[in-house]
Image: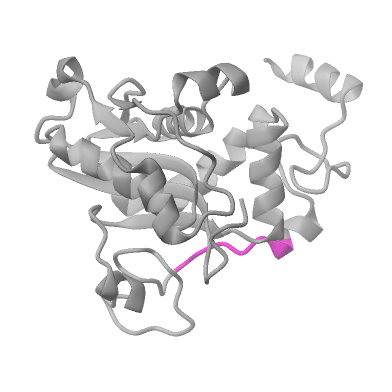
Amino acid sequence: MGAAGRSLFDLVLPPVCMACRQPVAVADALCARCWSRLTLIDKPYCARLGIPFSYDLGEGALSAEAIADPPPFDRARAAAVFDDVARDVVHGFKYRDHTEHVRLMARLMARAGQELLDDADVIVPVPLHRWRLWRRRFNQAALLGAEISRLTGVAFDPLILHRIRATQHQVGLTGSERDRNVRGAFRVTPDRRPAIADRRVLLIDDVLTSGATVKASTRALLRGGAQSVDVLVFARVVGKETGII
């Protein structure tokens, strides 16, 4: 849309905050109050999992979680902590069809994952099972991946990874139950293997909770021939509250 078209659209449907839905000056933005309450993740953080540290432990420092249970992916980064504001943004995007949220979310993700994007050969979204995709009508991870690709120029391929088994919602499951729920649920189909053979994959999702989904996806990508996998999400849970979305 041109400037005139956007002005007319804003006149008919005035822009509102992505979190609290109060009027704002421009579209695809947070109001000043919500922006001040959004907890962006910056260094220092765990070099492997991206968990924020309260103080700097030095270059390459690892969290207790990364040491105790090393993930199959190389690095994970998130733009924000999954707090009240991030939850409102994600839920509006994911469950209330506010797909316009993708623009701000992707910009913040590209900022948080710059080092990962610099190394990536291809962006791959975590897929939905076909029946869930039919009900929701869009895959939020694919929309984020496409927008990040547009912003950065890194290739995007939403057809590499497939969810071959329907899984129950992860909400309310323990960490071990989440792992069992998604185990073996993803696969790179044989005709797509050349697209990731010996390539560095950046896996995209909206929220990282226990990490079960991205771990299962990573294992499938590595079995399919990927050289390495990094993970980039909009928000991540920090602490023990992994059953909240």
Give the vertical position of 77 relative to 195 (above or below): below
Majority secondary structure in the magenta region: loop
Q: Residue drawn at (82%, 19%), measured in percent from left and top?
A: 9
Residue at the spot 61% in from the left edge and 23% down from the top edge: 136
Image point 11% across, 30% down: which residue? 197
Q: Is residue 41 magenta?
A: yes
Residue 150 locus on image (x, y percent): 43, 27
Report the coloring of the rendering: one colour
Q: Residue at x 22, y 35 (%)?
A: 121
- The N terminus: image quadrant: top right
Answer above or below: position of 76 versus 1: below
Is residue 107 found left or right of 180 in the rendered image? right
Q: Is residue 81 left or right of residue 186?
A: right
Write down the quadrant of residue 96 in the picture: top right
Left or right: 179, with 71 as reference point: right
Identify whether 245 is placed above or below 224: below
Q: Nearer the viewer, residue 35 or 165?
A: 165
Tell me where residue 220 sits by quadrant: top left
**In this figure, what is the number of numbered marks?**
0
Percent x, y of residue 56: 39, 83
Above or below, 149 against 19 in this view is: above
Q: Is residue 189 visible?
A: yes
Of residue 9 and residue 106, the one placed in the foreground of this image is 106
Segment colored magenta: 36-42
Q: Position of residue 106 (x, y in %)?
A: 52, 40
Q: Position of residue 82 (x, y in %)?
A: 59, 58
Q: Is residue 133 magenta?
A: no
Instruction: Let me know if residue 113 appears in the view.
Output: no
